[in-house]
Image: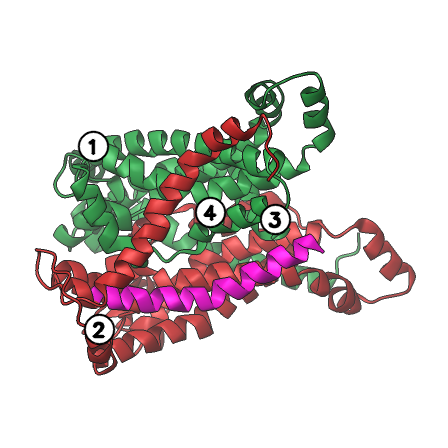
Amino acid sequence: MRKSPDLPYILLFLSPALILVGVFVYVAVLWNIYISFTDWRGLLPSYRFVGLLQYRQLFHDPVFWTSLKNNILLLLLFVPGSILMGLLLAIMLDRRIRFESGFRTIYALPFALSFVVTATLWAWMYDPSSGVLNTLFGKLHLEFLKSRWITDPKIAMYCIIIALIWQFSGYTMIIYLAGIRSIPVDHYEAAVIDGASTWQLYRYVVIPQLVKPTLSAFVVLMVFSLKAFDFIWVLTRGGPGTSTFILAVQMYKETFAKTNFAYGAAIATILLLMALAVVLPYLYWSYRGEEE
Amino acid sequence: MKVKPLRILMYAVLIFLAFGYLLPIWSAVTTSTKTGEQVALTTPIQLVLPPYFGAYKIAFESLKRPIINSLVFTTLATIFSTALGSLAGFTLAKLLRGSVSKKLLILITFGVFLPYQSILIPLVRLISRLGLYNTIPGLVLTHTAYGIPITTLLFTNYYYEIPDELVEAAKVDGASAAGIYTKIILPLSMPAFVVTAIYQFTSIWNDYLFGVVLTRGEEAMPATVMLANLKGSFVANWNVQMAGALMVALPTLIIMIALGKYLIRGYTSGAVKG
C-alpha cells in the first residue's frame, strides 16, 4: 500500500468494523473451537484440554445422527423446494399479470415475519384438535386429509419443511423476479425475431441468465437450513421426542438446557465446518468472477 | 388480448396459491378477534363480527415492555450498524483499491454466512464479562457487530457504482477523505441508507436467538422472546397467542407493505450482483 494522506481516515473509518467483526466473528469462532476440545460441563467454565473426546462421544450419540439426518432432509427438500416454488412464482408473475404487485406482496409477506411469529401461526395451523387444517378438512368433508401433523414423529419434520417453504419461497421469488427483469430486452427481442417459442425463450434465454441468482439463493438457503433453529425450537422444541432435532437445536439443548458447554461447542464446530463447505467455494467463485 | 386457456390456468394457480399463502395470516387475524368461547365454536377461518379485542389486551399486558425493549435496541443497532457499514463500505470501495480491499471485504462479509451457533457460547461469555448480560446495550452491541458484515457488503456494492472520477476530482481540489465522504458520498448514498436501514431494522426486530441467550426476565427481553414464552404459557388460548403474534409482526408487516420495494432491494442487491 502506498503511503497516502488517506491513511489516517482509512484506519479511522475501517477500524470499528474490523475490530467488531474481528472479536465477534473470528475470535469467537476460534474460542468456540477451543471450547470443543475441553471438558467444560456445568456453569463454571473449565478449559482443561481433552482432545477429541467430545467429537468421539458425538459420533456415538444417536441424537446426533437424527439431527444430521434432519439437516440433510432440509437440504434435500427445503432448499430445492423453496427454489422451485420461487422460480414458478417469479415466472408466472413475469407474464404480465394483473394485480402483479398485489400477488407479489402476498407471496413475499411471510418472509418479512419473524420465525417466532410464523412458528406461532403454524402451531395453530397444525394443532391436531381444533387447529386450522384439521377443522378445514373436516368442513370440506376431506376427513382422510386430517392428521396429527407436528405431534406425529413420522411426519413432523415434513410439516416443518412445508412451513419453511411457505416462508422462504417469497425470498427466492424476489431474487428470481429481479434476475429475470435484469435480462436486457434485446435478448428477448432477438429470440422472438428468431421465432423462439415461449418454452424456448425460457429454456435458452431466461434460465441460463438465472445461474447466478440460483447459486446465491442456494448458498443462502443452505446456510439457513443449517441454523434454522428459531422456527423449529418455537414450534416443536425438537419434538415429539427428538424427531425434529437438527444440529442447531441439539447444540442449543446441550449448551443451555444441559449446560454441557464443550459438547455444544463441538456440535457448533461441526455446523461451522458444514457452512464453510458451502460458503468458501461460493465466495471463491463469486469474487473470482468479479475480477475477470 | 385474446384469452388463452393457459392464462386462465395461470390465474387460477396464482389465486389458489395466494389463498394458501394468506391462510395462516388470515386465520391468525380471525382467531385473535374472538373470545375463547367463539374460538371453540367457530372454525378458524370464520370472521366473527363485531370483533372482540380482549385477547389483544391480555397479550399486550405481557408484550408491552418487551415491545418497547425491541423498539429501542432495534433502532439503536440499526443506526450503528448502518453508519459503520457505510464508513467501511466507503473505505473499501473508494479509499482502498485492489486486492487489499477485496481481501478485507471477504474477511468482513464472511460473517453474513456464519452459523451463529458457532459463536454462541463465546458471545454469551463475552457479553457477561462486559457486564452487559440482560441489558439493552448488550443487545445493541451484539446486533451492531453481527450487522456489520451485511451492511458493509450492501454499501460497498453501492459505492462501487459511484464513479471514481467524482472522488478523484474532489481530491485534486484538495478535499480530504472525510470531506469527500460528507460532501459527496453521503448526499449520494441516501437510497443505500434507506435500503440498509430497513433491512437491518427488519432482521434485528425478527431475531430470536441472540435475544433468548442474552436476556433473562423483563428488563431487556425482546418481543420475539416474550412471544415464544406466551406460546409456552397459554397453550390453549389461541386467541391470545394469535393476537400476540400479530402485534410482534406488525412493525415488519408495515415495513413490508409500505416500503416493500426498498426491503426487496436489500434482499436482492446481495444476490443478483453476487
Q: Over which residues does the magenta segment extend? A: A264-292
Mark 2 → mark 1, Cα distance in angstroms: 48 Å
Task: Return the mark for residue B31.
Answer: none
Q: Quadrant of residue A242?
A: bottom left
Q: Residue at x 51, y 59 (%)?
A: B17
Work out which quarter of the rendered image holds the N terminus of chain A and state it: top right
Q: Colour of chain B?
A: green
- Under mark 2, the amino acid is Gly
Mark 4 sits on what residue? Answer: B108
In three-dimensional space, the C-alpha distance between marks 1 and 3, rounded to whole angstroms, equals 49 Å
Q: Which chain is red?
A: A
Task: Answer with left or right where residue A135 lies relative to residue A193.
Answer: left
Chain for numbered disc 2: A
Q: Earlier in the sequence, mark 3 or mark 4?
A: 3
**Front tag of 1 and 3:** 3
Q: CA distance from mark 3 to mark 2?
A: 38 Å
Which is closer to the viewer, label 4 or label 1?
4
Mark 3 — residue? B99
Q: Disc 2 or disc 1, which is closer to the eye?
A: 2
- Which residue is located at x 70 percent, y 64 percent? A207
Query: Dot 1: what SS?
Result: helix
Reading the chain from its start, which is encountered first: label 4 or label 1? Answer: 1
The chain ID associated with circle 1 is B
